[in-house]
Amino acid sequence: MASVLVPTVCPYCAAGCGFFIAVQKGRALGIEYMPDHPVNEGALCSKGNAVLEILDHPDRLRTPLRRKGDGWERISWDEALDLIAKGLGSALKRCGPDSIGFLSSSKCSNEENYLFQKLARSIGCRNVDSCARLCHAPSVVGLNRTLGAAGMTNPISDIANSKCIFIIGSNLAENHPVLSRWVHRARDAGATVIVADPRRTHTTWMADTFFPLKPGTDVALLNGLAHVIIKEGLVNRSYIEEHTRGFEDLVAAMVEYTPERVADVTGIPAGDIVRAARSYAKSPASVILYSMGITQHTTGTDNVQAIANLALLCGQLGRKGTGVMPLRGQNNVQGACDMGALAEFYPGYKKADDPETIRLFEAGWGIEGLPLGKGFAATEMIEKAAEGRLRAMYIMGEDPASSEPCSQNAQTALKALDFLVVQDIFMTPTAKLADVVLPAAVWAEKDGSYTSTERRVQWSSKAIEPPGSALSDLDIICRVAGRMGLDFSYPDAESVLAEINRLVPQYGGITRERLDPHGLVWPCPDSCHPGTPILHAGGFKLDGGRAAFVPVRYRPPAEPISSEYPFILTTGRVTVHHNAGSMTRRSPSLQKREPDLFLEVNLKDAQELDVADGDEVTVASDRGETVAVARLTDGMKRGVVFMPFHFSRTNILTSEFTDDEARIPEFKVSACKITKRD
């Protein structure tokens, strides 16, 4: 009997790699590559190649559970739904809708995220957010403000057309390995590659110029580049006059960011700053790639706006090989944001505090009394739970007990809730704190669309059935809504997408029948539109059709080092890790390659600490301490150490300071100390 090949999209990073699942007699037997896919061309990274290992894992949740003493009791779906309706309804009745928090999932499909935020707002609750808050919220705020669209401006494959590639705050060779192939193609064709990162990573191996900047000094570097470009007359004057506003304000603000001053702040030689500015400005096609090394700061929004300023100065937008490219970390971070799983936006980035938004969705949903105004962001939900202002939470596919900064505080806050329901595929640390746990299907066990980092919307088809009585997140949401008195009569994901087509302009023409074989790129306003791979080619969707220069000033990180905590801790991912690890730590072929928490330490720093390679060390911050294995390297700046956040023990250490606007935590800079264990 021949296998059936079912097309799907990788559930790990947001590159949007496509492949086939080979199915026989209802079982996933293996994967087949998809050589005609426009992004990965058949290639998959180590995580993609190992992705089927989680499907039949013995840890999969298979039935609803409720807490019973210190353990768990299996219950029916009817019992679970009754408990959820009672728990959420009690908080709603006693304390009002602002006492409930809904945390959506960037692992789930567009349709599921859309319905989840609709459920929250339909009961009057403004507090709906997603893990986008912890990775790319500054991109949403910063790019909407400067360019008028919160998405990657150019397709991934277009990187191959670039002549100058500036990578800042992104280790894409490890975090988005398939995407790095396009950088290699450009480099082989003569492109210049500039990489700015506190660590010497696999990505820096591609660099012609490497800037080992001090963590948290990105704005200073970006402003320094802008200063040189303005001073040397390298700006694209005609582009600025035709397409932008606020140029003179930027010029005035950049005067103080001389290469010499920026060198003192960042640790990068002044001459290197000048040469990089010339390369970027003079290139006929320059692109900027960035990721969480830019966004996970108290100045994350400023960092994004400084990147946009640089692109606008040189007119490096709206053409092949140019652009601003935020590389998203989770498979559907872009889609979750597009669908309104954000505290400040309804679907389609309609502002939650705009009465016109409320009128639009009340008419579209046939529901009166939708909540006006911004709700609590994910980080604020934890704060409000600790204060007693948030009494209940519904969490779908997220693990804040592991991923939130100062994670022990997050766990304490979740324990303080009157009621917590968690919907997931494994018993995560967050699920272990819940009153009710719901078993969900993984991506291969359901239909739905996902939006990759390049705004490509693709359809992923159901290949196999979920285990036990697990259901798709869409089915669960509809059942919960029904039990709470709402009419969520959606028979399938396609019917939800049809509603999205009507209410989200960017998705107007992205219908199910048009998504085969490799999807469409939004904005795609109607069924005749081909999609828009390159944004801003015809101008900007801002007032007057002009992009905005937004000058920003360098501000140091919120937590300085001290005599007690003399090291800067920065965090990130490595090749076989993914986010909080709920999937990759259950993948045997990946886990055996990186099983332990490690700390990268500069060789000279280690010598002064009397620490040898492989020694166990205690890493402590003002918030707690953890144990890791030391890895000595000359790829770290002195005074800076690195830990992967794949292990929940890392976020015991990270600070709770956040960006004032995007409300993202400063994961990338925390003060710590290191001691050798006996």
Image (cartoon, rainbow, N blue to C red):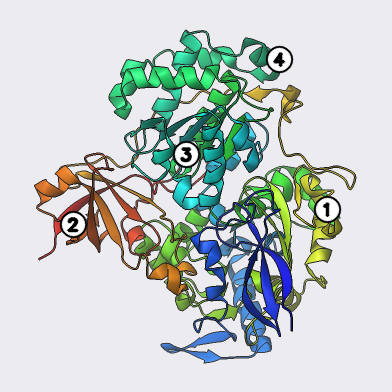
Q: Secondary structure at mark 3?
A: helix
Residue depicted at 69% across the width and 28% down the height: 318
Counting residues from the N terminus, which is met first, the one under dot 1 or under dot 4?
4
Q: Quadrant of the N terminus?
A: bottom right
Residues at circles 1 and 2 in contact by the CB criterion of under 8 Å: no
The answer for how far apart the CA atoms under marks 1 and 3 are is 32 Å
- Residue denoted by label 4: 242
Q: Nearer the viewer, residue 158 or 85?
A: 158
Residues at circles 4 and 3 in contact by the CB criterion of under 8 Å: no
Q: Secondary structure at mark 4?
A: helix
Q: Closer to us: mark 4 or mark 3?
A: 4
Q: Position of residue 394 (x, y in %)?
A: 58, 69
**Label annotation for residue 613:** 2
In the picture, measured across the screen, residue 91 lies left or right of residue 589, that is right
Residue depicted at 65% across the width and 45% down the height: 454
- Residue denoted by label 1: 501
The answer for how far apart the CA atoms under marks 1 and 4 are is 33 Å
